[in-house]
Amino acid sequence: MQKKHIYENILVDKSKEEFLDLLNHDNIRIERIVSNGQKSEKDFWYEQEENEFVLLLKGSAILEFENKEMPLIEGDFVDIKAFTKHRVKYTSEDETTIWLAIFYK
């Protein structure tokens, strides 16, 4: 067992997002995502087989669903059910955005 910190080794790279698996076990996967202005490509939608609980730890973002937008600030969270079409419309270019994503079945 080893103690780690959620804000350890944050990568600030405007050219790509960082995805780091914190836990990967049978029916659950926990991932830290670091964004620096990245967003989903035009006409791209996530529609994964897993449920996804998303907590915005730092920064700001906008999630887009088929018929609505959801602005997020630090501390906001949302539970996205499996097969729900969604995308990242915006993440701040001025400050790092850190997400905690929990994928579960």
Image (cartoon, rainbow, N blue to C red):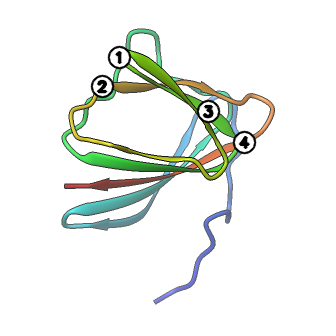
Q: CA distance from mark 4 to mark 3?
A: 10 Å
> Which residue is drawn at the image coordinates 39% and 9% (left, top)?
43
Quadrant in the picture for residue 30: bottom left
Disc 1 and disc 3 in contact, CB within 8 angstroms? no
Q: CA distance from mark 2 to mark 4?
A: 25 Å
Q: Earlier in the sequence, mark 4 or mark 1?
A: 1
Residue beneath disc 4: 96
Disc 4 and disc 3 in contact, CB within 8 angstroms? no
Residue beneath disc 2: 85
In the image, taking residue 13 as reference, residue 88 lies left or right, namely left
Instruction: Report the amino acid beneath label 2.
Output: Lys
Residue beneath disc 1: 66
Residue 53 spot, x, y in % from top left: 39, 51
> Which residue is drawn at the image coordinates 52% and 86% (left, top)?
2
Instruction: Report the amino acid beneath label 3.
Output: Ala
Q: Secondary structure at mark 4?
A: loop
